[in-house]
Image (cartoon, grey):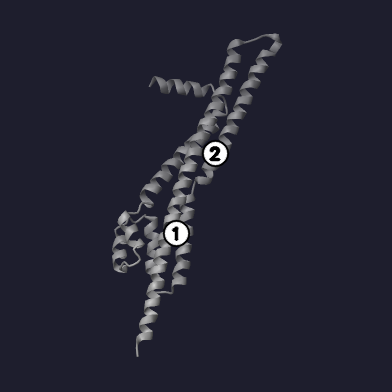
Amino acid sequence: MQYLTTSLQALQLGGLMVYPLVVLGVLVLAILLDRTIVYIRCTRLPNQTIELVETYSFKWIKLEERIASLSSGSHYKRFFQVILDNRAHPAWWVESRASDEAQLIEMSLNRGLWMLETIVTAAPLLGLVGTIIGMMESFRLIGSSGLVNPTGITGGVAQALIATTLGLVIALIALFSYNYFSHLHANTMDKMQRLGTRLIDHLRMDEEEGRGSRHEIP
């Protein structure tokens, strides 16, 4: 409790630029929470399902059972369901529909990341503005009527340091968060593309087998 009180008092000394910096900090935390929930709920895929798709020789009914067991909000379920719903069509048609769905999923996963990237740049700049304002206040007091107000000068320096520190801390959190979620996004889309390719290849194999069966009919 004492640490929280001290932190609030320090923020009050940070001057006007503390308020937009606090807003940016709240935005970073909100995006972190939102993206964490999305990746936990929507991008998990059991290893059994991955192994099934990787075999190439699975039965479609078995895959349908696996997909049905996924949560309703799963992005993989959305993606696989498009392929399952269109597998009666030619492989090129299914591939096109799957690609469209993958783009929608990618847009969903990218939501909010642009804001983190912006905050990485904006937070230090706002902190720098606060630093300049604090130092200008200190210089004004030093040069005011030739008198020096030690308390006022210290307050200006404190304002400059607090604004700079707060801006850098927020930028660092946003930077690490952006890099982490970008890494998760890349891995998710790579896995989805790989598994989607396996399913399309399976459809092409089924088409080839169907053509071979027709040719064998006397």
Q: Work out which residue is located at the far bottom of the displayed protein and give it.
A: 218
Q: Distance from label 2 to label 1 (Cα)?
A: 30 Å
For the C terminus, give its image quadrant: bottom left
In front of the other: 187 or 56: 56
Q: Work out which residue is located at the far top of the displayed protein and give it.
A: 147
Which residue is labeled 1 in the image? 193
In front of the other: 66 or 157: 66
Question: With respect to residue 200, does 189 lie above or below?
Answer: above
Question: With respect to residue 192, does 35 lie above or below?
Answer: above
Q: Position of residue 151 (x, y in %)?
A: 58, 12
Picture quarter containing residue 98? Answer: bottom left
SS assignment at label 1: helix
Disc 1 crowd, CA 10 A, few/some/many (<14, 14-19, 20+): some
Question: With respect to residue 196, does 13 lie above or below?
Answer: above
Picture quarter containing residue 64? Answer: bottom left
Which residue is labeled 2 in the image? 119
Is residue 80 in view?
yes
Is residue 23 in view?
no
Q: Position of residue 57 (x, y in %)?
A: 33, 67
Q: Position of residue 201 (x, y in %)?
A: 41, 68
